[in-house]
Image (cartoon, rainbow, N blue to C red):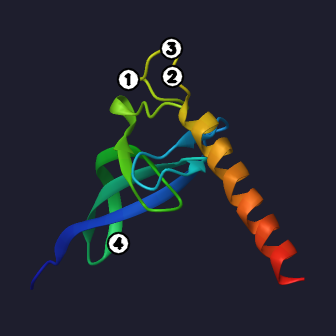
Amino acid sequence: MFVIIGTQIKKEDMGCLTEPRICPRCRRLVHYQNIREQRWFTAFWVPLFPVQSDQYFQCPSCGLTFQADSFQPALTDQNADSNAPSMLEKGARQAGRLYGRFKKYLNDTD
């Protein structure tokens, strides 16, 4: 007689954060997903009881993850001066410039 034992990982989506944050990798304003990951002890591929549990936040755009206890990506730059423009202000200015270029391009092609 033999016994097959092992572990299995199950992921559960716990929802999204209500406050959008800027991802440091992809620089997008996103609602991070809250994910709980549990490792289960199995016998004959049947999960019996949880052995280990982790919780983390994941960017839905690029997949960057943060542990739940160390998660603090800011909505604005934390290292910037108070007089310096925030990342959102910089992004808004860049979007305005791109819109102006696009509008000029459309007028030139007519």
Q: Nearer the viewer, mark 2 or mark 4?
A: 2
Which secondary structure, mark 1? loop
In the displayed orientation, state which residue is furthest to the front.
108
**Residue 82 image label:** 3
Q: Point out the tag, 4 or 1, that comes first from the N-terminus.
A: 4
Q: Amino acid at mark 1?
A: Asn
In the displayed orientation, state which residue is furthest to the right.
110
**Residue 46 image label:** 4
Q: Nearer the viewer, residue 62 or 82?
A: 82
Image coordinates for residue 38, horizontal then vertical, percent:
36, 53
Q: Which residue is mark 2?
A: 84
Q: How far is disc 2 from disc 4 in space, using C-alphas?
A: 56 Å
The residue drawn where x is 34% and y is 45% is 54
Q: How far is disc 2 from disc 1 in space, using C-alphas?
A: 10 Å
Which quarter of the figure has residue 9?
A: bottom left
Q: Do the CB atoms of the residues marked 3 and 1 lie less than 8 Å apart?
A: no
**Residue 79 image label:** 1
Q: How far is disc 2 from disc 3 in space, using C-alphas?
A: 6 Å
In the displayed orientation, state which residue is furthest to the left.
1
The residue drawn where x is 68% and y is 59% is 98
Q: Amino acid at mark 3?
A: Ser
Image coordinates for residue 32, horizontal then vertical, percent:
54, 47
Placement of 15 over or under 4, stated as above or below: above
Task: Classify residue 52 as left or right of residue 2.
Answer: right
Q: How far is disc 3 from disc 1 in space, using C-alphas?
A: 9 Å
Image coordinates for residue 78, horizontal then vertical, percent:
43, 23
In the displayed orientation, state which residue is furthest to the top.
82
Q: Nearer the viewer, residue 71 or 12?
A: 71
Q: Amino acid at mark 4?
A: Val
Q: Amino acid at mark 2?
A: Ala
The N terminus appears in which quarter of the rendering? bottom left
The C terminus appears in which quarter of the rendering? bottom right
